[in-house]
Image (cartoon, helix red, strand yellow):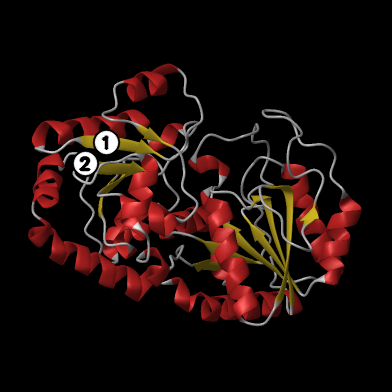
């Protein structure tokens, strides 16, 4: 089967790029040929197709006119179209609706994964009308959490009524994340063996990431521990305003990304995700896979991760976290329980089977479109 995987941007360290790469690998594990299509590529793979109209030529600008010929060609050349947030995020609405229209015209099955509906955060463009997120009932819509599935049901009841909605949580490579090199990574970062390294995997421009809140937690831990504490923000983009002020006060700041996620988690002693909003919060599951303590919240979807059996203290539980950091024996059982939960419910090793089922459902919906 020929699969065209589409997103606004691919190949970066952002959550959608990371998730799209997992799906591409999953389809390839099934023996399918995958073409990546995007408005912008951070990396490059043979066969990548750049689609004009999905990405702005300059930061803050509007995308150029949509290249309908390329979109239609990709629809006709592939057996399945996977729109990974490309039909959800209000950054290139003309391109999103073009993918839907050409897929319907060519009879191409469509599987949409919705990460960031416009109403859940700050829209990148003025939201006008009811076009995006795409919500045609002939297509299969995959939501990454139950909350978003409920919101889709409330807005478009026919999607729920006709079986067009599925919830598939984002998954993590459990075994791979446990294989990082702690000593080498810490040495590269200039972190001493006795220092407590507090990891915050977040972008500077993401207001929802709550960098000031993360710095506060790191500062409070420094006051409670008898070891030096260092705050590690994985984005080294220059900050402004209140974020810059918070970073200036951070204890022992470390900035910048490392190439391998497993090394990132191996180097850390604690992972922070004190976000006000996340669609899922991959670092929580990744920390569990890597057997690292994690503090997260108050973003609402975190409750769904906790419901899977993960113990995730909130930002106000600094005393509990400090005690666990000071007593590895006491931390061993909650870390082991989190690891078991993420392996049972969120292991990417099971993803190919999930994708095979989704692809079949998408083909059936295209072959027999439900009535609106």
In this rendering, does residue 358 appear at all? yes
**Residue at 52 percent of width and 68 percent of height:** 166
Label 2: element kind: loop
Relative to residue 311, is residue 243 depicted above or below?
above
Q: Which quadrant: the C terminus?
A: bottom right
Q: Is residue 228 above or below residue 117?
A: above
Crowding around mark 1 (Cα neighbors within 10 Å: few <14, some 14 to 19, many 20+) is: many
Distance between the alpha carbons at the discs numbered 1 and 2: 7 Å
Q: Residue at x 48, y 67 (%)?
A: 168
Does residue 102 lie above or below 222 as drawn?
below
Q: Residue at (36%, 18%) from the top-left corner?
A: 245
Number of numbered discs visible in the structure rendering: 2
Q: Residue furthest right?
A: 69
The image quarter in which residue 45 lies: bottom right
Q: Is residue 298 visible?
A: no
The residue mark sitting in front, 1 or 2, is 2
Classed neighbour count for the residue bearing mark 2: other residues with Cα under 10 Å, few (<14), some (14–19), many (≥20): some
Marked residue nearer the N-terminal end (1 or 2): 2
Answer with the quarter of the image where residue 158 lies.
Answer: bottom right
| Above-or-below relation of 344 to 335 | below
As drawn, is 187 to the left or to the right of 333?
Answer: right
Pointers 1 and 2 in contact (C-beta within 8 Å): yes
Q: Nearer the viewer, residue 204 or 91?
A: 204
Q: Secondary structure at mark 1?
A: strand
The quadrant in which the N terminus is found is bottom right
- Residue labelled with disc 2: 195
Q: Position of residue 97 (x, y in %)?
A: 76, 50
Residue 70 point in image, percent of width and height: 87, 56
The residue that mark 1 highlights is: 230
Left or right of residue 77, residue 223 in this image: left
């Amino acid at each position: 089967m020929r699969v065209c995987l589409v997103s606004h941007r691919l190949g970066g360290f952002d959550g959608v790029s990371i998730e799209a790469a997992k799906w591409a690998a999953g389809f390839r594990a099934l023996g399918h040929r995958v073409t990546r299509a995007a408005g912008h590529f951070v990396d490059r793979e043979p066969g990548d197709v750049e689609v004009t109209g999905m990405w702005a030529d300059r930061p803050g600008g509007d995308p150029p006119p949509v290249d309908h010929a390329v979109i239609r060609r990709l629809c006709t050349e592939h057996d399945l179209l996977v729109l990974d947030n490309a039909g959800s995020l209000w950054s290139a609405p003309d391109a999103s609706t073009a993918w839907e229209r050409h897929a319907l015209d060519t009879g191409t099955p469509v599987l949409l994964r919705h990460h960031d509906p416009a109403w859940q955060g700050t829209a990148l463009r003025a939201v006008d009308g009811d076009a995006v997120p795409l919500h045609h009932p002939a297509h299969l819509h995959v939501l990454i959490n139950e909350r978003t599935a409920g919101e889709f049901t409330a807005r478009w009841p026919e999607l729920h009524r006709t079986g067009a909605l599925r919830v598939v949580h984002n998954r993590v490579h459990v075994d791979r994340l446990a294989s990082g090199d702690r000593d080498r990574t810490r040495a590269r970062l200039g972190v001493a063996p006795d220092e407590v390294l507090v990891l915050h995997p977040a972008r500077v421009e993401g207001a929802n990431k709550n960098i000031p809140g993360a710095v506060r937690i790191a500062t409070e831990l420094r006051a409670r521990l008898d070891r030096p504490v260092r705050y590690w923000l994985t984005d080294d983009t220059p900050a402004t305003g209140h974020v810059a002020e918070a970073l200036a006060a951070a204890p022992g700041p470390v900035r910048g990304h490392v190439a391998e996620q497993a090394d990132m988690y191996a180097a850390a002693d604690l992972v922070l995700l004190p976000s006000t909003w996340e669609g899922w919060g991959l670092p929580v599951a990744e920390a569990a896979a890597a057997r690292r303590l994690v503090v997260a919240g108050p973003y609402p979807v975190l409750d769904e991760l906790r419901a899977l059996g993960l113990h995730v203290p909130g930002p106000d539980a600094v005393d509990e976290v400090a005690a666990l950091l000071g007593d590895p024996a006491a931390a061993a059982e909650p870390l082991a329980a989190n690891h078991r939960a993420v392996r049972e419910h969120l292991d990417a090793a099971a993803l190919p089977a999930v994708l095979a089922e989704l692809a079949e459902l998408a083909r059936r919906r295209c072959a027999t479109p439900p009535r609106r």
